Image (cartoon, coloured by chain):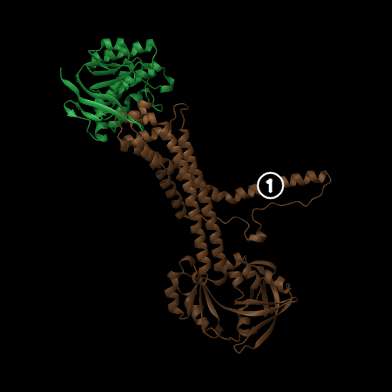
Chain colours: A brown, B green
């Protein structure tokens, strides 16, 4: 094996004419390096977007909810205390979630009414992160105050301070109408929430839904929501009501996200297939370039399997180094991606300003355009979400290694089958 | 003298897409240890083919080749590789040095193919051989930094490094100018004398053939 290693390294290392690294090896190495770098960035960005969407999903429905039959869960305070004592539980809050109608100055609109304890907007980190105040404040301490989603407020024609009519239906289908004052308008980064969600205080919800002493449900948040299943049995043992994990409630969205990730993996696989064909062609060129040398080595005693091993080892080394350096490059690029994009934004905007200034001097007035990769008004994110996962780095490195080696099997086989007498005769 | 190589009824037919070309037809050859044998004949008569068959580089269509009484034409590829590495030295018309290796590394290549670690003693021997070839100052030069004659002298040193029983030289001076050709010739005779190595030379040169112990002419 040592002799195979010696010749493999020699073929990677030097090119007689330039006394430098072999151009063929460099091309193959950079092909894998760029492929790995791009893959890590793509996967990190996909993970980031994936994570961002998951966060948004988790914000609305907590990690686990218990729902009671009829009016809801009686003696809910007792269960809340018990649930709070379970290890790994971060917060437990009662809530109401029912449908109703809301009437503003312009329209009547069907909505989801969430009854939540008013302190949730100060205490719950997820709420603080995801719910952004557009006007007014997130204050539900005042009796009969309501918070409206931004699009909902637009649709019904309501502003902060306006009185709106909230209509709910009793168990006997009687329409009950209540007056609420809009104390705040919010955006939650999700179209459905912004156009149909309204928050009222838990106490007000109990009153309007005629459920004194009941909670429609209990929302539980845990330290590790991704492993919600592991908390389930203990939580269920202290609260014997129907339970729904956030994963079950949003299984379609989660399945779609998983499918997206699989799709990205498949695209990356094909991307690497292209890369491997590139390596294949470069290593074939290497074998053709070294044809005479392989022939003379075989004449002097190089065994056919050793000839094959030399080129397989070259492919393995190229794949390994390309994978390692590509992953490091990908990590660096992923970690600094937002700074790089910000830099590009600054550069483009600087050019806009210069162009704007020149136009202004020439007497042409145009509004100053502003370039942004992510319009936070539209995407609810002001920077690209990046999440680097160890598994993805392993995936990319293994793929580089496997394809680097697989791509050279054919040329390595060709080298092993090369008959010295034919090459030396034809020369 | 002891018989080193023996070939019986050697026939070589090359198959092409359209027909078959018979190059050698039932040839018998016997080469003794320490002998210098010249193989002469016009181009296309099968000099190179005969050398390839006798050295185990190619297999005959029919007939047998023996080396020290052992049949070699039916050995496996791996066994033939080992056989060539241990017993045969090659000098071709073209030097066929490895471009990415310096002169010393090129001389050591046959040893690299058979040994995992090269003993210091053998490295000294390689340097000594290069010195004998008049390449003392060229030991660490790469082929593209050497002249045609110097490259061929490195190839001669490479052929000798494994102490082979026999050296097959196929037109060893064919690509050199007269001065360099004479130089290589004199080196070959000196080495033959010093190491008592068997020489099988395919050549067009009457001068070389005349200096050999025996001449086979392929008609």
Circle 1 marks a residue in which chain?
A
| Residue A417 pos. (x, y %) | 34, 36
Compared to A169, does A183 lie above or below? above
Res. B183 image quadrant = top left
Q: Is residue A269 left or right of residue A210?
A: left
Q: Is residue A6 left or right of residue B216?
A: right
* SS at mark 1 in the image: helix
| Residue A233 pos. (x, y %) | 42, 74
Quarter in which the N terminus of chain A is drawn: top left
Q: Is residue A388 left or right of residue B131?
A: right
- Name the residue: 30% across, 27% down: B110
| Residue A272 pos. (x, y %) | 47, 48
- Name the residue: 49% across, 51% down: A268
Disc 1 crowd rating (10 Å Cα; few below 14, some 14-19, many 20+) is some
Res. B118 image quadrant = top left
Q: Is residue A142 visible?
A: no
- Name the residue: 71% across, 72% down: A155
In this orientation, which residue lies closer to the viewer: A198 or B16? B16
Q: Is residue A261 visible?
A: yes
């Amino acid at each position: 094996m040592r002799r195979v290693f010696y010749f493999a390294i020699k073929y990677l290392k030097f090119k007689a004419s330039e006394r430098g690294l072999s151009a063929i090896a460099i091309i193959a190495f950079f092909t894998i390096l760029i492929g790995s770098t791009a893959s890590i960035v793509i996967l990190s960005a996909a993970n980031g977007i994936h994570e961002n969407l998951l966060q948004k999903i988790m914000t609305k429905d907590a990690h686990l909810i218990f729902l009671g039959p009829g009016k809801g869960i009686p003696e809910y305070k007792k269960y809340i205390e018990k649930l709070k004592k379970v290890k790994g539980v971060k917060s437990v809050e009662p809530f109401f979630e029912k449908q109703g109608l809301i009437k503003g100055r312009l329209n009547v609109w069907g909505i989801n009414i969430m009854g939540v304890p008013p302190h949730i907007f100060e205490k719950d980190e997820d709420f603080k992160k995801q719910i952004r105040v557009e006007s007014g404040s997130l204050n539900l301490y005042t009796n009969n105050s309501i918070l409206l989603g931004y699009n909902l407020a637009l649709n019904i024609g309501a502003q902060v301070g306006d009185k709106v009519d909230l209509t709910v239906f009793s168990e006997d289908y009687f329409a009950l109408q209540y007056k609420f004052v809009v104390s705040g308008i919010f955006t939650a980064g999700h179209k459905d929430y912004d156009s149909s969600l309204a928050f009222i205080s838990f106490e007000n919800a109990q009153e309007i839904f005629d459920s004194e002493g009941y909670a429609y449900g209990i929302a539980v948040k845990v330290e590790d929501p991704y492993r919600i299943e592991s908390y389930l049995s203990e939580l269920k043992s202290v609260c014997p009501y129907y339970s729904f994990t956030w994963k079950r409630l949003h299984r379609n969205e989660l399945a779609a996200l998983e499918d997206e990730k699989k799709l990205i993996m498949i695209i990356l696989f094909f991307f690497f297939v292209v890369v491997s064909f590139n390596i294949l062609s470069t290593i074939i060129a290497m074998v053709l370039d070294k044809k005479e040398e392989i022939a003379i080595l075989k004449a002097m005693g190089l065994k056919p399997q050793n000839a094959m091993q030399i080129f397989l080892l070259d492919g393995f080394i190229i794949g390994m180094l390309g994978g390692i350096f590509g992953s490091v490059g990908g990590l660096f690029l992923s970690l600094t991606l937002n700074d790089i994009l910000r830099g590009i934004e600054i550069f483009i905007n600087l050019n806009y300003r210069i162009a704007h200034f020149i136009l202004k001097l020439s007497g042409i007035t145009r509004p100053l355009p502003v370039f942004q990769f992510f319009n936070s008004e539209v995407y609810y994110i002001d920077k690209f979400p990046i999440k680097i996962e160890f598994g993805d780095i392993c995936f990319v490195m293994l793929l580089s290694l496997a394809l680097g080696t697989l791509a050279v099997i054919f040329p390595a086989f060709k080298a092993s089958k090369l008959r010295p007498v034919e090459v030396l005769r034809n020369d | 003298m002891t018989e080193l190589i023996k070939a019986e009824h050697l026939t070589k037919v090359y198959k092409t897409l359209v027909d078959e070309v018979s190059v050698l037809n039932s040839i018998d050859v016997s080469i003794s240890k320490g002998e210098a044998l010249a193989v002469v004949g016009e181009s296309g008569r099968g000099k190179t083919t005969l050398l390839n068959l006798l050295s185990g580089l190619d297999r005959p269509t029919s007939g047998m080749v023996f080396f020290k009484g052992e049949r070699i034409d039916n050995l496996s590829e791996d066994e033939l590789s080992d056989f060539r590495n241990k017993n045969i030295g090659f000098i071709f018309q073209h030097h066929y040095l490895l471009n990415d290796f310096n002169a010393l590394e090129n001389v050591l290549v046959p040893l690299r193919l058979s040994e995992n670690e090269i003993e210091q003693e053998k490295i000294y021997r390689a340097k000594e051989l290069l010195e004998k070839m008049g390449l003392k100052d060229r030991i660490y030069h790469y082929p593209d930094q050497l002249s045609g004659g110097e490259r061929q002298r490195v190839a001669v040193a490479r052929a000798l490094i494994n102490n082979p029983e026999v050296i097959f030289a196929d037109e060893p001076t064919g690509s050199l100018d007269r001065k360099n050709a004479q130089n290589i010739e004199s080196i070959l005779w000196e080495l033959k004398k010093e190491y008592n190595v068997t020489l099988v030379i395919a050549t067009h040169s009457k001068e070389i053939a005349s200096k050999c112990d025996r001449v086979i002419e392929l008609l």
